[in-house]
Image (tube, rainbow, N blue to C red):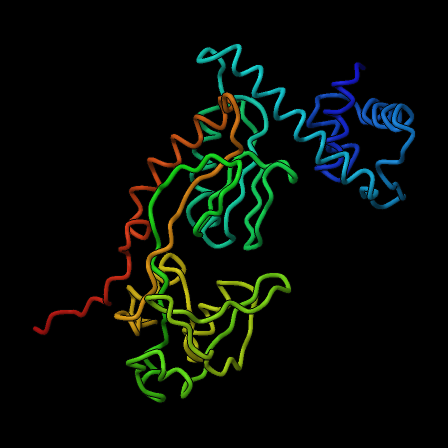
């Protein structure tokens, strides 16, 4: 097995966490994958994978080397795409990441359809609310709901998203409807944090920040935050897509609309390069068209609950 194939085998084994699964991804036998990684480690004079009878994990050197391998293989694929041009059909592993709830609701169905259209493409999805570093972690495309900093990524705008404050009708009946952000100090709220980071602060239009209301519950999953708001646990800050169904059917109400901050831009991003691989070009074009049609990405999707007409 040549050196390039050894690198690809190492990446497949490391990403799958198993010699057997990595071998299947490379269409080789498990013993061949084991020999390839052992040969690579001997060539480098470094242990890349720590093996036990039950698990496989990267060493510190292995983590660094994996990031470098992903970068090298991505650049090689881009170079090949530049040569083959439009004749290059989508193929290979397409790795996508998105915020957890948005990914499950909106990106996963797009990925399923894309895989049906392109049988030579395989998919890998990571739906998480933490920031995923595309190049270091080996991802091709990400959906970002945020103001993007300057970076080496190509960004394709697909819409914008309202950031709102919601509560259940029962909570508002018990505790009153806030009319101004300063009223929040009299309310209880549901806090949100992402994997040990500081809690998301409460901010409103024109850069107005206020002291956070009393957060008697703090969670790290948006679906739990929404469920808590529906259960009457307090006010919650949310992006429109997270609560559109609950607002539409009357389980939640939007408050403080006049004080909403500017809508948050939404982009598909991918590493910049001379030419993106065909799988990336095709998926971004396909997904962007579909996403731009979503009401929640046009600042909509939070209609008041419909009331049945009196007979």
Residue lying at 72% horizontally and 24% vertically, measured from the top left = 8
Can residue 56 be seen at all in this image of the molecule?
A: no
Residue 31 is at least partly visible in this image: yes
Residue 109 placed where, x, y %? 43, 41
Residue 46 lies, with reference to residue 220, above or below; the image says: above
Taking 207 as reference, is 5 left or right?
Answer: right
Q: Residue at x 24, y 62 (%)?
A: 303
Percent x, y for residue 265? 38, 50
Q: In the image, residue 302 lies at what x, y percent? A: 28, 61
Determine whether 281 is above or below 81 in the image: below
* Left/right of residue 37 with respect to residue 257 in the rendered view: right
Judging depth in this view, the residue of 106 and 99 nearest the camera is: 99
The number of callouts visible is 0
Could you say which quadrant of the image residue 290 lies in? top left
* The N terminus - image quarter: top right
Where does residue 140 sit, x and y in percent of width and height? 55, 34
147 or 106: nearer the viewer: 147
- Give the vertical position of 275 relative to 256 (above or below): above
Considering depth in this image, is 66 or 104 the residue closer to the camera? 66
Res 203 → quadrant = bottom left
- Give the quarter of the figure containing the C terminus: bottom left
Residue drawn 74% across the image and 18% down it: 4
Residue visible at 50% across and 47% down in the picture? 98
Task: Tell me: 206 left or right of 231.
Answer: left
């Amino acid at each position: 097995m040549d050196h390039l194939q050894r690198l690809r085998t190492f990446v497949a084994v490391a990403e799958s966490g198993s010699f057997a699964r990595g071998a299947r991804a490379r269409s080789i036998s498990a013993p061949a994958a084991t020999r390839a990684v052992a040969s690579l480690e001997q060539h480098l004079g470094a242990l890349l994978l720590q093996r036990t009878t039950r698990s496989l994990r990267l060493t510190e050197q292995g983590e660094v080397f994996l990031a470098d391998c992903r970068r090298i293989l991505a650049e090689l694929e881009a170079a090949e795409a530049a040569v083959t041009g439009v004749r290059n059909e989508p193929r290979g592993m397409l790795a996508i990441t998105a915020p957890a709830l948005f990914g499950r609701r909106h990106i996963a169905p797009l990925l399923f359809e894309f895989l049906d259209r392109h049988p030579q493409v395989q998919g890998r999805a990571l739906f998480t609310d933490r920031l995923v570093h595309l190049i270091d972690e080996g991802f091709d495309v990400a959906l970002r709901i945020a103001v993007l900093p300057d970076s080496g990524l190509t960004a394709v705008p697909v819409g914008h998203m309202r950031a709102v404050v919601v509560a259940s009708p029962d909570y508002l009946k018990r505790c009153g409807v806030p009319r101004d952000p300063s009223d929040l100090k009299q309310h209880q709220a549901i806090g949100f944090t992402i994997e040990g980071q500081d809690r998301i602060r409460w901010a409103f239009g024109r850069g107005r920040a206020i002291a956070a209301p009393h957060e008697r519950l703090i969670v790290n999953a948006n679906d739990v935050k929404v469920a808590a708001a529906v259960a009457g646990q307090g006010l919650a800050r949310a992006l429109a897509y997270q609560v559109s169904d609950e607002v539409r059917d009357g389980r939640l109400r939007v408050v403080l609309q006049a004080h909403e901050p500017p809508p948050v831009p939404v982009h598909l991003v991918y590493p910049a390069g001379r030419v993106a691989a065909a799988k990336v070009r095709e998926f971004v074009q396909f997904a962007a068209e579909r996403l731009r049609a979503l009401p929640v990405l046009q600042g909509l999707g939070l209609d008041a609950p419909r009331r049945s007409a009196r007979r």
